Image (cartoon, grey):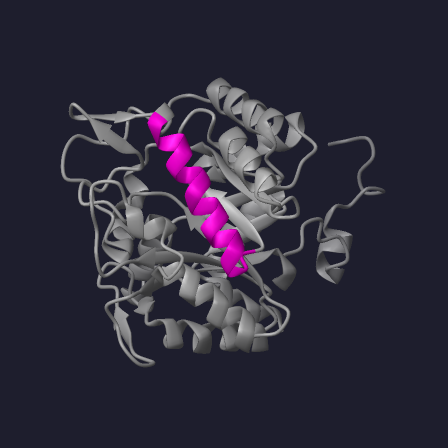
Amino acid sequence: MDEMFPTVRMRRLRGLKLIQETRLSIDDLILPLFIDENIEGRNKKPINSMPGQYRFSIEGAVKEVLEARSLGIKSVLLFGIPARKDAIGSEAFNKDGVIQRAVRKIKKEVEDVIIITDLCLCEYTTHGHCGLIENGRVVNDPTLGVLGRIAVSQAEAGADIVAPSGMMDGMVKAIREKLDNEGFTDIAIMSYAAKYNSALYGPFREAADSGYKFGDRSGYQMDFSNAREALREVELDIQEGADIVMVKPAIFYLDIISKVRASFNVPLVAYSVSGEYSMITAASENGYLNREEVIMEGLTAIKRAGADLIITYFAKDIATLLK
């Protein structure tokens, strides 16, 4: 028996619930939304692989953001599905593209909302990859100029933060320089700094219509067995001008979140991805898990590991639970 026993009894304060070290806040949450240019009116289309999630029309997205704000959620991350795709993803930098119009509409009709825009080509290209294609390969440097054009078009529309997700080397520097040269020095960059090549993205590809037509994304997304590489990726993005860095996915990568938090003093976001959502949803619908309890435990673990902000499809659920 410990010589301190019974003087030290760890159960005393547990029973009083006085020592909760990690607390989730509604302010920690970022709600991702899929906006489909092919949907009219205020309609929405269910996402089969993500029960309870939808693609929204622009008008429908405004309604959804208004509801999120009523729950206290201040930040949204927007993904666009254009009506037309091509090899270079030109709709991504179209000033009247789906995301650009959505940003303007949301800013006009919703008060006090932070709009983050996904900045990538995969949803906009016919091949579904995150960069331009030459000779059957995703090419890095020619893609950077396109990413800069997208960033400027999103900033012009009113985005508060742009979020490059394609894992192109040098993307943050190229975007920062382009934004600054065009006078958008106050637009922040939230970089998908450590984005792993994960099997957990499957449902997202249906949601965003971003499946690739050949090969895979292992040439630019990270090998899931690597940890030290993540720190190098984050370090480089900070040097290039990232204001916020991200680890994606989240629940399977708590060690990476913890390592990044211990190594860098910058805002850190974790993306709890579509596969995490779908697994928890399926298990709870089958009665294997208690949905509310698992959601709270999972996201608290992400926060405990060191994330400042969490992108989660459960944002509305959590906001309701925390109110």
| 315 versus 154 height, above or below | below
Q: Can I make out residue 210 in this image?
A: yes
What kind of secondary structure does the magenta stretch mostly adopt? Answer: helix
**Residue situated in front as seen by the camera: 71 or 190:** 190
Residue 62 lies left or right of residue 40; in this view the side is right
| Residue 147 falls within the magenta-colored stretch | yes
| 87 versus 79 height, above or below | above
**Residue situated in front as seen by the camera: 149 or 255:** 149
| 255 versus 149 height, above or below | above
Residue 48 lies left or right of residue 182; in this view the side is left
Residue 46's image quarter?
A: bottom left
Where does residue 302 sit, x and y in percent of width and height?
A: 54, 45
Region rendered in magenta: 142-159
* Quadrant (top left, top right, bottom left, bottom right) of the C terminus: bottom right
Residue 106 lies left or right of residue 267; in this view the side is left
Q: Can I make out residue 320 in this image?
A: no
- Residue at image position (73%, 32%) is 1
Can you name the residue that lies furthest to the right here?
Answer: 7
Residue 282's image quarter?
A: bottom left
Residue 218's image quarter?
A: top left
Residue 31 lies left or right of residue 303; in this view the side is left
- Residue at image position (50%, 31%) is 174
Where does residue 284 sit, x and y in percent of width and height?
A: 34, 63
